[in-house]
Amino acid sequence: GPMLIGFTFNVLLLGILMTQLYLYYTHYKRDKLWIKLFVAAIFVANIVNTVFDLIYLYRVLIINFGEHNTYIPDCHLTQSMLQVLIVLAVQSFFAWRTFALTKKWYWPVLIIAIAIASAVGGILTPVEFVKRPTFATVIQTKGPIILWLASGVVCDILITGVLVWYLHQHKTGFPRSDMIVDRIIRLTVQTGMLTSTLATVDMIVFLADWMYFRHLIFNFPLAKLYSNSLMSSLNSRHGWQYEDTTNDPQVVSSISKLRHQVAASNTRQVC
C-alpha cells in the first residue's frame, strides 16, 4: 500500500516536472549552456529513477506478493543511489546560488559539506540493505537513514536561511522594488519548507512505524520534489519582472541593482 501510494506521487510529480521542463526551455533559451545541460541531466536521472521505482514495486508487490520475509530487490540499490545523487545535485546548485548572491565562499562550502554528509547516509542505506537484504531487518539501518534525512533537512534550512537573510538585508526601501524581494523570499521559503518538511516527515514516520513502511509514501517522491523546487526557482524568474513608468532615478537605480543581483544567482539577466 505505502509503496504504491508513494510511487503514485512520484509519477504525478514527474508529470509536473515535465511541464516545468517545457516551460524552462521555452522561456529561457538564453540561459547558459551548462545550466541547460544540468536541467536535462536532472530530468533524465528522474526518468531512470522512476523506472527503477517501478521495477522495485513490481518485484515486491507482484513477484513476491504475500511473502512476509521478502528480500529487498537488487534494483533498490540503483534506485536509492539515483535519488541521493539527484538531491545532492539540486542542493549543490542552490549552494552555488548562495555564492553567486552573497559572494561569501563559506556558505556554499558549509552547505555542500552538509549535503555530502546527507549523501553519504543515503548511499550507506542501500549498502546496508545489501548486507541485510530483508525488509524485516530494515530497522537495523536506522543510523544511515537518520544521517541521510536529518542532514538533508539541515541543508535545506541553511540554504533557505542564507538566501532569505541576504535578500532581506538588501531591500531598497522603495515599495515596488521591495515587493519583488518579498516575492522572491516567499518562493524561497515555500520551496525550502516543502523539501525539508517532506524529509522530516519521512524520517519521523520511519522511526515511529518502520514495520509497515508507511515512510515510503514520503520517500518515493523525494527526488521529484527536489527537482521541482529547482525548476520552480528557475521558471519563477519570469514573475520577477517589474514594469513601472516612474522617472525617479533613485527608484530606477535600485530596481536595476536588484535585478542584477537576482539575475546573477541564475546567470541570466532578468529584463
Image (cartoon, rainbow, N blue to C red):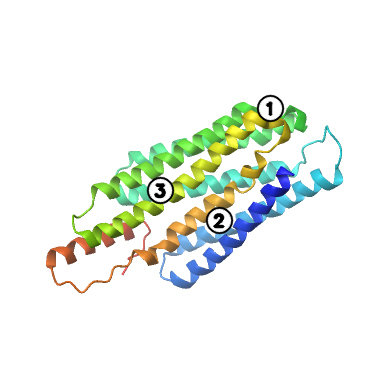
Left or right: 49 as drawn, with respect to 137? left
The residue tagged 3 is 189
Return the mark for residue 139. Answer: 1
**Residue closest to the far bottom:** 245
Residue 227 in the image: x percent, y percent?
Answer: 53, 53
Residue at image point 52% right, 44% down: 88
Instruction: State whether residue 109 is above or below residue 144.
Output: below
Circle 2 or circle 3, nearest the eye: 3
Q: Does dot 2 land on a helix, a strand or a loop? A: helix
* Type of amino acid under label 1: Ile
- Give x and y (percent) for residue 232: 47, 58
The reply to whether discs 2 and 3 touch (Cβ–Cβ < 8 Å) is no
Q: Mark 1, residues whose alpha carbon is within 10 Å: few (<14), some, or many (≥20)?
A: some
Mark closer to the chain start, 1 or 2? 2
As helix, strand or loop, the secondary structure at mark 3 comes to helix
The amino acid beneath tag 2 is Ile
* Residue 80 appears in the picture as rendered: yes
Quadrant of the image containing the C terminus: bottom left
Look at the numbered disc 1 and give the secondary structure of its residue: helix
Marks 1 & 2, CB-CB < 8 Å contact = no
Foreground: 14 or 144?
A: 14
CA gap, disc 1 and disc 3: 33 Å
Q: Image quarter for residue 76?
A: top right
